[in-house]
Amino acid sequence: MVLPGLENRSLGDPYMMKYRGYYYLYVSAGDRNIYCWRTKDLMEWSEPFICCTDETTAVAYAPEVIYWNGLFYMCTSPRGGGHYLLTSESPTGPFTHQTGNLGRDIDGSMFVNDDGKWYFYHANNGGIRGCTMPTHLSFGNDVDLGCCISGQWTEGPCLFKRNGLFYLLYTGNHVWRGVAAPHIMADDFELGFSNEWGYKEGNWNIIDGQLESTGRYGKMLMGGFDDIHLTDYTVECDVIYGSGGTNGGLLFRTTNASTGGADDNPVLGTDFLQGYVFLASGSSSTLGKHNYGWQALSTVSHNIDLSQPHHMKVEVEGATIRCYLDDMDKPLITYTDAMPFITGRAGFRTHDSVLRFDNFKVTPASCNSTDIKSPYTGSSPSTHVRYYNMQGQPVSAAAAQNGGMYLRVQGSESRIIAVPTR
């Protein structure tokens, strides 16, 4: 569906409310404004109403609106960084802020029960959580509702009630499928930027045939929309250190990357992503995880000469991550994530550091060295079948015959299978 007024924009997180014979639609639009459309028949839509222009809620994620006793209440989490509550006398705004940042991560949703009690639901890395609302503008203590899709990032909660039963809806951030045409993607920066770089923030330049993080803060990801669904692959590059710091390295299995603040500031958005990063300094290497924040998963001490280039490589297979530095035969770090991110693109991230990178390459598990920048069409050339459980851990074909749900991957095709208990 294409909405009038923003035909060339990617809009997400649609939420619809019905009020006095009209349906009102709110979305994540990715700019300073919060928009709303109105329709009577779900076919013909109005031009967009601008509901709010306050910079505090710029890049508002998943705005939702409910009506109660003469006021419309909106909740939204700008860039997924905690929730604000707003009110208006009209479903089309203007909505004004009634609270500061109340936290609770991302994708908030309000529900009013038949007895007039209010409830709030949201998503975090553990799945869907819920709490009471002591007032219309405050949250109580939340609890884990035990709703998490296959150990993956789960979001978009929405509760409704029908015939005495409560129904909780939620979704995930990927669709458990492979890439339509997986192929090796690479860039040696000799002829400028490859056209396969799909996301870039911050100031990056090519100097002497190498990529430099001139702006000190930023992220780059290779691949387009289909490549967001890359699952198992190897990513590698050369890293060249100078005197500008060492906090930078390889991003992988990365989704939902974004800048921060109303002015799309890469400094504020340094942790606005979900995925992993492999970093190396003179004295240690670290595997880290981003979930709109930063967590070190594993750190290994060593000594390397920063005056020399070094080669970094990461292999991801199911929930297992192997990180290499210089020695490509022996992993420096091997880590199995209990709640892994399974899909996402690869690239670079720097934090307050000027580094150079070269000879970047992403090799999907179903490709070989002759596939570079040559997408194939039709069915996958690979006949090898791999299986994963719902925690992203590889299992044998025999184990996948036991009862349960499994992800079956063959070349570029993947699907969920349900095996009955014998």
Image: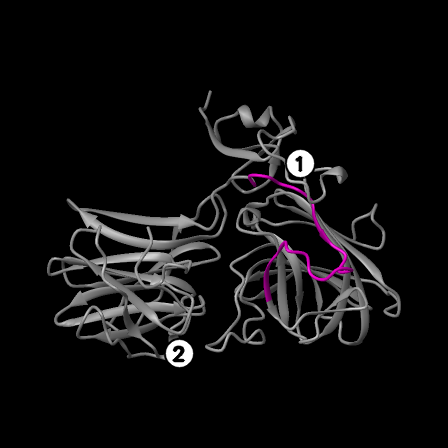
Residue closer to the observer: 170 or 344 = 344
User: Is 131 situated above or below 267?
Assistant: above
Please tell me whether the stretch drawn in magenta is mainly helix, strand or loop: loop
Q: Type of residue at label 2?
A: Thr
Residue 322 lies in the magenta-colored region: no
Bin the neighbour count of mark 1 within 10 Å (Cα to Cα): few under 14, some 14-19, many 20 and up: many
Q: Residue at x 45, y 69 (%)?
A: 81
The picture quadrant where one finds residue 30 is: bottom left
- Identify the residue shown where x is 83% and y is 48%: 328
Q: Which residues are magenta?
A: 179-200
Q: Can residue 348 be seen in this snapshot?
A: yes
Secondary structure at badge 1 equals loop
Q: Horizontal and vertical percent for residue 404?
A: 47, 31
Q: Nearer the viewer, residue 220 or 296?
A: 220
Choose top left, top right, bottom left or bottom right for residue 165.
top left
- Judged from the image, the secondary structure of the residue bearing numbered disc 2 is helix
Q: Which residue is mark 2?
A: 56
The image shows residue 57 at horizontal and vertical percentages of 38, 74
